[in-house]
Amino acid sequence: MSFISRMSCLAAGTALLCSATVGAVQASEEVNLYSYRQPHLMQPLLDAFTAETGVKVNMVYANKGLLERLVAEGRNTPADVVITANAGRLADLVDADVLKGVNSDKLEAAVPARYQDPQNRWFAITKRGRVLYASRDRVAADKALTYESLADAEWKGRICTRPFTHSYMIDLISSMIASHGAEWTETWLNGVKANLARKPQGNDRAQIKGVAQGECDIAIGNTYYYGIMLSDPEQRAAAEAVRPVFPNQDGRGAHMNITGAGVTRHAKNTANGVKLIEFLVSPRAQEIYAAQNFEFPVVAGVATAPVIAIFGEFKEDGVNVADVAAQRRAAAQMVDRAGLSS
Amino acid sequence: MTLGVAAPTGFRRDHDRSYLVIGLVAVLATGLLALPVGALVWFALDVDPGLWPHLRNTVLGNYVTTTALLAIGVGTGVTLIGVGAAWLVAAYEFPLRRTLEWTLMMPLAAPSYIVAFVYTDLLDYAGPVQGTLRTVFGWQSAADYSFPEIRSLPGAIIIITLVLYPYVYLLTRTAFLAQSRAAVEAARMQGMTASAAFWRVAMPMARPAIVVGVALALMETLNEYGTVDYFAVPVFSTGIFHVWINMGSLEGASGLALMLVGAVAVLLLLERRARADRRFADPRATRAAAARQPLPTWRGFAAMAVCGLPVVFGFLLPFALLIGTSWYRLDALFSGDLAKAVLNSLELATLAALIVTLLSLWLAYAGRISRAPVLRLGTRLASMGYAIPGSVLAIGILAPFAAFDNALDSMLRDTFGISSGLLFSGTLFALLFGCTVRFLALGFGATEAGFERVPRSLDDAARLLGSGPLDLVRRVHWPLLRASSLTAALLVFVDTLKELPMTLALRPFNFETLATLTHQYASDERFAEAAPGALAIVLAGILPVILLSRTIRAASRPRT
């Protein structure tokens, strides 16, 4: 008796749980979100959206597997909107055909053409630069830097970076391939490898700390980490030891990456989904993002953001982010050939 | 169809049928549990032909070597600490022994990626250790001295060993306690020294438990991603994500994951061969009160130090540093979000522990009464999920269940005009199923090790006296297996609390567990914000670990 009864209790308990969870996402005015961005970054925006529109947002966050989940769920997917943390993932979503084009004058007007899909399947909501951080002590203040120059012999043993297998590095290498072709980039990558001060490790902040500690003179890192470090009393000293340098200012401009959003092909709440993305590119939402995470607004005219005060104006690489994303596989295999996979 | 049930002739017919049913259900269950691995095989078949030559020519050799070194390092470490500590606390009396007996399990409660974070904070250039050294010796910068790099293969081996040795300790200690003292005492009376008695009597008898413990630790090592990624160690699991995410090849990632599964299968098979015909049950196990040998003073303190160090470095130090980091954020521990996550975590862990324990009991029992190859193969295959990184396993679960859900939904729409939606893949079922597949190896390993200690002669005697199959389990096996089953349940409970990658990918909307809540900060390397959640995971895991220790101790006492 004991086994049978315990098993059936269990089955009943599980069924109850399941039905409770299903019920939770079928109320009327809401939108269901699959997010590759962390909830602590998204929640303030979503709360503001709900307060303004009365539409409830349900969210699943995962850093891997949401695309595969969308593909597997097919037409029964509960997700209406997907948010990714980089352009590459947006390209994957387009390749997997799980997004649909939406018509929105607001989105068209707010988001510059190179930061949206030509068929309106995704729109960027914020952007960030991948820049260089030079030692204030050991690199001349007027030294102009380019990504290309990182392979020059003068930087031998002076460069710190996170592992090349990280998506931020893969994206940067992809942009080099998009600008210079694969053969040139492979030579460049091996040149950068020869200039490394230590085995690539840690995140972008660890590289800035590496410069502050004297292990290296140049660090590669994203813009927002610097902003976060400046605002943290414990990390401020390390951030103040470096000078952010926007590379290629006399040429094509600094490499940019985006956070983007799109409506799913089988969305049940399309109108609310579009409303959510429109809200995310509204001046108010753009300010929230810039203020809390030091990311650059994707729309013009939000100049009050503190991030602008830190970095000032700079020139962005004008290449289409989708063209960069198309080179990721080539970049990843290049990293393997260079012996930089870890 | 025959399942080769090992029932002696002359049994009542209806019992034969019950045995058959038990076997059949077990085969069906293992078939279902092997689905995710099957799905990965399906993906892997479709791999881009250019990918394997590329991997072979570039990184594969490095992945294999580094993974093997990591496994050998962790395997050696967990065996030395786990078996050594288990023998000391089981056989000797020394200062603080009773406290160490249960605190030795504490590192189970801490997720390895959190421990890795804590030690990096402590030991890297900006940390207090190097800072103090610089102050004391007057060094100015990193160029003035050298300090071992924590973010390295040796660093990963040490961290993972510290977190995983309790699997070996736990199972080995249970085995030592269940051994007949008579055997060891007889050996001593024959003039063997204490160490000879250990090597020649106690160790061989505990071998199945040790092997299970080490195998579990190794599978966990292979699927581990947080620490090796943070330390930039190029092993299979980091390679799997490089191929999946950067090269956009889920197919290639599945292939790499299956290579891991294959390697584990071969190792386990070899070990089984090596002890093929030995029996480890002791029919004379009398459960005589353990007479521990007191150690002379200095050796007693040495034993205390040996058992104390893993506790200090695997638990106390990281725990203290976590409290230190969370100190100014302790109010976060009492926020509504965290409270909800605690409830979700406990609910998930309880359900997973129940399901896995009962299923393990069923499968281990079926394996005992039947020698059908299909059942043995199924059980092995189903336990292999543990060696696969959680996010990959998650896709292996989603794909078949979502395909089934969509097919059913289409059929119902076409014939009845109603939609069943994502019946399995869109609910908590998927996550519970995932936890079952992922942690079956834990539950089954602990339960099977327990079964191996029950002499088959007891089964035969009970059957001759007319016991049916359920009677046999309830009246003969269960009293002897209770401790093993509770061990299984608590191991699964604690591991589900810590589980992260699969929960992330399979959970329903708005469902946060302690691990997912912590991860969103940890993944951004915001250690200070992540600390309160990490502390909550450890706190939630401590109670079951204490419970576990009490159960094992109680079960090893003589009963009246």
Image (spheres, rainbow, N blue to C red):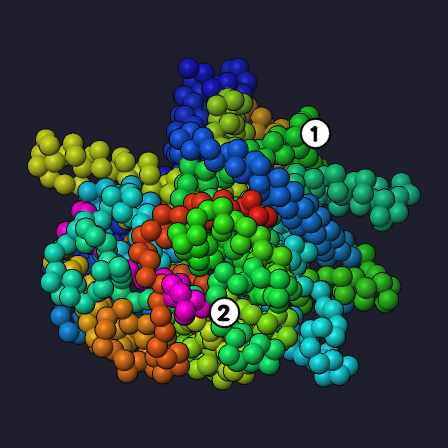
Q: Nearer the viewer, residue A243 or B71?
A: A243
Instruction: Let me know if residue B284 is in the magenta part.
Output: no
Farthest residue, direction right: B191
Residue B207 as seen in the image, left or right of residue B407 = right
User: Which subunit holds the residue at mark 1?
Assistant: B
Tell me whether marks 2 and 1 sit on the same chain.
no
Number of residue marks: 2
Residue type at mark 1 is Ala
**Residue B8 % position (x, y):** 55, 18
Farthest residue, direction front: A250
Helix, strand or loop at mark 2: loop
Residue at position x 53%, y 15% from top? B9
**Residue B352 % position (x, y):** 41, 49
Q: Nearer the viewer, residue B379 or B555?
A: B379
Q: Is residue B414 above or below residue B385?
A: above
Q: Is residue A194 above or below residue B247?
A: below
**Residue A257 % position (x, y):** 36, 62
Q: Residues within 10 Å of mark 1 (few under 14, many from 20)?
A: few
Residue at position x 8%, y 37% from top? B417
Highlighted range, magenta: A247-268
Q: Is residue A183 above or below residue A301?
A: above
Q: Nearer the viewer, residue A145 or A161?
A: A145
Report the residue marked by disc 1. Answer: B274
Residue type at mark 2 is Leu
Instruction: Let me know if residue A255 is in the magenta part.
Output: yes
Report the residue marked by disc 2. Answer: A145
Residue B529 as seen in the image, left or right of residue B409 = right
**Residue A122 % position (x, y):** 23, 55
